Amino acid sequence: MQYKYYIADVFTEEPFNGAQIAVFPNADGLDQIKMQLLASELNLSETAFIFSPANGTGKRRMRIFTPHSEIDFAGHPIIAVGHVLASIGEVKLEQEYTPLKLEQNIGVIDVNITQKDGKPVLIQFSMETKPVIDRFVPKEEQIAEVLSLIEADIDNKKFNPLLVYSDQSYLIVPVKTYSAVRAAKFNFSAWSQSMAPACIANEILLFSTQTDISHSNFHARLLGPNIGIHEDPPIASAMPAFTGYLCAHDHIKQGTHTFVIDRGSLDKRKSVLNIEMDNKQEETLTIRVGGPAVITGEGTLLIPDSGK
């Protein structure tokens, strides 16, 4: 059988920027083995498979695979799926804002598509998260060594390193400069000798209030034991943890806050995320993550009936 797919660059309006996501908009008939084969064949960071809406609900099942395994939640594929479905007419854009419900393994995600002249210009999804904050983290000297930085690079004036658990645990580290974020390299030996694994941190999200684009509030980057030294992976899935991190600081007042956070560099693949968070200083935090996307390619893959 033949399956059509699209490649979307996400959190960017410029082709060949942002994060590349593959979308199979009509995945009916594919099982887990075949989806994993397709995701491995395309070898992008994430591939999304969309199934026909459930009867009477309008809700579409969405499954996400990396080249190696299925994952329960990811933010970039939501933006890609919303943009692709609207662009190819699978979702009709009859009003300025069109709602869409996508069911990932963690539950149903509410999506809103903003259109202009009949074309999607902004995809935004909202979700509720219950971030758990742990202040038991490695010393700044250890953190700097893990990042191949010096202790003076760690910024502790307005923010502090914290462990935050949402869908997974992140050690979130503020650093002083954009250049330090870009220069950081994960030191596996220092990681294994630090207390970070003991506090069950899966990845490190480091960020700076210094960026290379004028309209951004934060520049961020993910590092960790399962991330290559020179990789700069998508950060949208870390936003529930990052917003919880921000709200754990006293100078972030109650109310709705909006900010822009970017990833990557101007000479490579820059992503720009628009974030809203409702800080009610309660257990549950509501966040909205939005951005544009652009389709850069499409194709067809053939799956033999045997799945081999």
Image (spheres, rainbow, N blue to C red):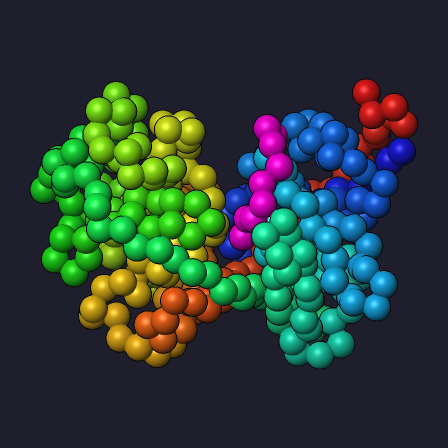
Q: Main secondary structure of the magenta part?
A: loop
Position above or below: 228 against 161: above
Q: Position of residue 152 (x, y in %)?
A: 9, 42
Q: Nearer the viewer, residue 213 or 20?
A: 20
Q: Is residue 141 left or right of residue 192?
A: left
Which residue appears at 25% of the width and 47% of the height?
Answer: 173
Image quarter in which the N terminus is found: top right
Q: Position of residue 262 (x, y in %)?
A: 39, 53
Q: Nearer the viewer, residue 91 or 265?
A: 91
Magenta segment includes 69 = yes
The image quadrant of residue 215 is bottom left
The mark tally for this picture is 0
Image quarter in which the C terminus is found: top right
Magenta segment includes 116 = no
Q: Which residues are magenta?
A: 67-76
Which residue appears at 53% of the width and 44% of the height?
Answer: 19
Which residue appears at 67% of the width and 56% of the height?
Answer: 103
Which residue appears at 74% of the width and 50% of the height?
Answer: 50
Position above or below: 168 against 55: above
Q: Nearer the viewer, residue 38 or 19?
A: 38
